[in-house]
Image: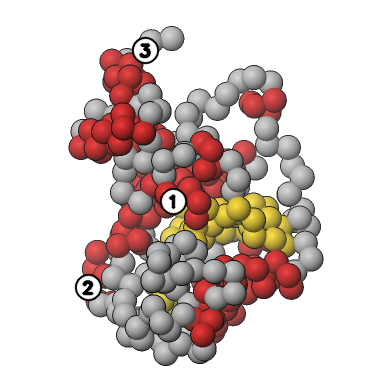
Amino acid sequence: MTVSVSNVLFKALTHRTPLRLHLARKFVKQFPLFSYEDRLSVDAIDRANYGFCIFQAARLASLLHYPRISVLEFGCGGGKGLLAAEMHITEVMKLYPVEIELYGFDNGSGLPPPTDYRDMPHYFRPGSYTMNRPSLERKLKRAKLVIGDVKDTSATFFQKHDPAPIGCVFHDLDFYSSTRDALTLFDADSSHFLPRVFMYFDDIVGNNTWLCNEFTGERLAIGEFNQQRKLKKICKNYYLPRAYPYASWANHIYIHHDFEHPRYNDFVAEREQTGHEDSIRLK
């Protein structure tokens, strides 16, 4: 096996001590010498949280022989997340034979008035995060915008857009009420999803003014979803903080498990169980 100079340099730089890894991220991020997988594996790329979820969704789709999947973002605002997702999709599609669609959900006019304390009005101001739709649409190359009240657009999404099975979802709606409505999407038939869907929740940690908790915001929406559904659950990815101990976003990654999905029990660990690790380093 040929070992490239870039691989040797990458391994030397990214020996996982906090200081070295911090410096490595800054170095790796600036130079195109390193591959997409290298940069993603050490969080040295814009929105690595998006890249991780897209990468893993495509990897699972490939193992299960899905030719196409969809990626969703709830709460697009100015569109930086969608543009980052487009970049990651372009790179991931070079690694796996999976076509990836991208949809962005937003009401287009910023945060609505909060419903009650569960939307944490002490922290979120109505009207924040407005979208300049014409400007954003000119920048987008792949994403399709789904504009309207999320309660309505979630209910009609599959009928109107006929998307490929959903492989990952990014939630950045801030409110409990909006996140609750977005999660009803998972009540659709299993054919619309991979058996395990990678999810990122932006608003579950906060700060000492925000004070996120299990009785408000996105955490409450997740908890209620799990209470109300017997065989569909949204669970933390417990491995990720261990694999990426210095990446704060690792604590925001969840997995939607559909235990009744007809493909849920399909065996996908052949390489790991036989000792032949996946050629892609990112785990």
Residue 59 at least partly seen:
no
Amino acid under label 2? Ser
Circle 2 Cα neighbour tier, 10 Å, few/some/many (<14 / 14–19 / ≥20):
few
Q: Which residue is mark 1?
A: 249
Pointer 1 local density, CA inside 10 Å: few below 14, some 14–19, many at least 20: many
Marks 2 and 3 sit apart, C-alpha to C-alpha, by 45 Å
- From the viewer's perspective, is the residue at label 2 or at label 3 nearer? 3
User: How many numbered callouts?
Assistant: 3
State the separation of the CA atoms marked 1 and 3.
31 Å
Q: Which residue is mark 2?
A: 135
Q: Look at label 3 and name its amino acid.
A: Val
- Could you tell which of marks 1 and 3 lies nearer the N-terminus? 3
Counting from the top left corner in percent of width and height, residue 84 is at 33, 55
Please tell me whether mark 1 or mark 3 is closer to you in this view.
1
* In front of the other: 65 or 176: 176
The kind of residue on which mark 1 rests is: Trp
**Up-down relation of residue 5 to residue 27 (above or below):** above
Tell me which residue sits at (79%, 66%) in the image: 230
Instruction: Determine whether 80 is above or below 177 in the image.
Output: above
Quadrant where the N terminus lies? top left
Which residue is tagged 3? 3
Q: CA distance from mark 1 to mark 2?
A: 29 Å
Please say whether residue 261 is visible from this viewpoint.
yes
Q: Secondary structure at mark 1?
A: helix
Nearer the viewer's eye, disc 1 or disc 2? 1
**Residue 26, percent from left and from top:** 24, 37
- The x and y percentages for residue 194 are 63, 54
Residue at position x 48%, y 30% in the image: 280
240 lies left or right of 48: right
Quadrant of the image occupied by residue 138: bottom left
